[in-house]
Amino acid sequence: MTDETQIDPQVPPSGTGCGECDDHGGWWVHLRRCAACGHIGCCDSSLGRHASAHFAATGHRMMQSFEPGEDWYWDFEAEETLEGPVLAPPTSRPETQPTPGPEGRVPADWRDVLRAARAAN
């Protein structure tokens, strides 16, 4: 499937949300979990794109969805979805945490904010 150094099923997630967004008071659309080290980052639909930034900085190419009910993996290098082993719990953000999230930091016009950001790129 993949290079075994890219997936460590024993490593727990780094938290319940994107650490970089949390550090700067930001917000995310969906969350991704690094299968090598457990880092939680936001998806490419989010403003920060911190899961992709984590891959670029570390070379950790395998991410798993950190959304409830989803267990698919994304391989940044091959640019494809894959199946993989069950990772250490918890396997998703808390179901009480809204999407986008976290609660209280998502602007009411979040869709417009994302559209404007995409248009600027």
Image: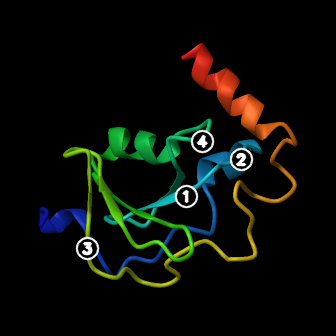
CA separation in Å, label 2 and label 1: 10 Å
Q: Residues within 10 Å of mark 4 (few under 14, many from 20)?
A: many
Q: Position of residue 96 (x, y in %)?
A: 75, 76
Spatial distance from mark 4 to mark 3, Cα to Cα?
Answer: 24 Å
The residue identified by callout 3 is 84
Query: Which x, y percent locates residue 44?
Result: 50, 41
Residue receiving disc 1: 31
What is the three-letter code of the residue carrying label 4?
Ser
Amino acid beneath label 2: Trp
Q: Are marks 3 and 2 in contact (CB under 8 Å)?
A: no
Whether the residues at callouts 2 and 4 have beta carbons within 8 Å, the answer is yes
Q: Are marks 3 and 1 in contact (CB under 8 Å)?
A: no
Query: Alpha carbon of mark 4 to alpha carbon of mark 1: how far?
Result: 9 Å
Q: Earlier in the sequence, mark 2 or mark 4?
A: 2
Q: Which residue is mark 2?
A: 27
Q: Is residue 81 left or right of residue 47?
A: left
Front in this rendered view, residue 18 or 65: 65
Q: Report the residue at 63% width, 69% height from top.
A: 16
Per the model, the C-alpha gap separating discs 3 and 2 is: 28 Å
- The Cα–Cα distance between marks 2 and 4, rounded to whole angstroms, is 8 Å
The residues bearing labels 3 and 1 have C-alpha atoms spaced at a distance of: 17 Å
Q: Amino acid at mark 3?
A: Gly
Give the residue number, with chain letter if any, for mark 4.
46
Describe residue 75's horizontal placement relative to residue 96 as left or right. left
Q: Quadrant of the N terminus?
A: bottom left
Q: Nearer the viewer, residue 1 or 109?
A: 109
Task: Say which residue appears at 45% left-offset and 77% top-offset.
Answer: 12
Q: Residues within 10 Å of mark 3 (few under 14, many from 20)?
A: some
Q: Bin the neighbour count of mark 1 within 10 Å (Cα to Cα): few under 14, some 14-19, many 20 and up.
A: many
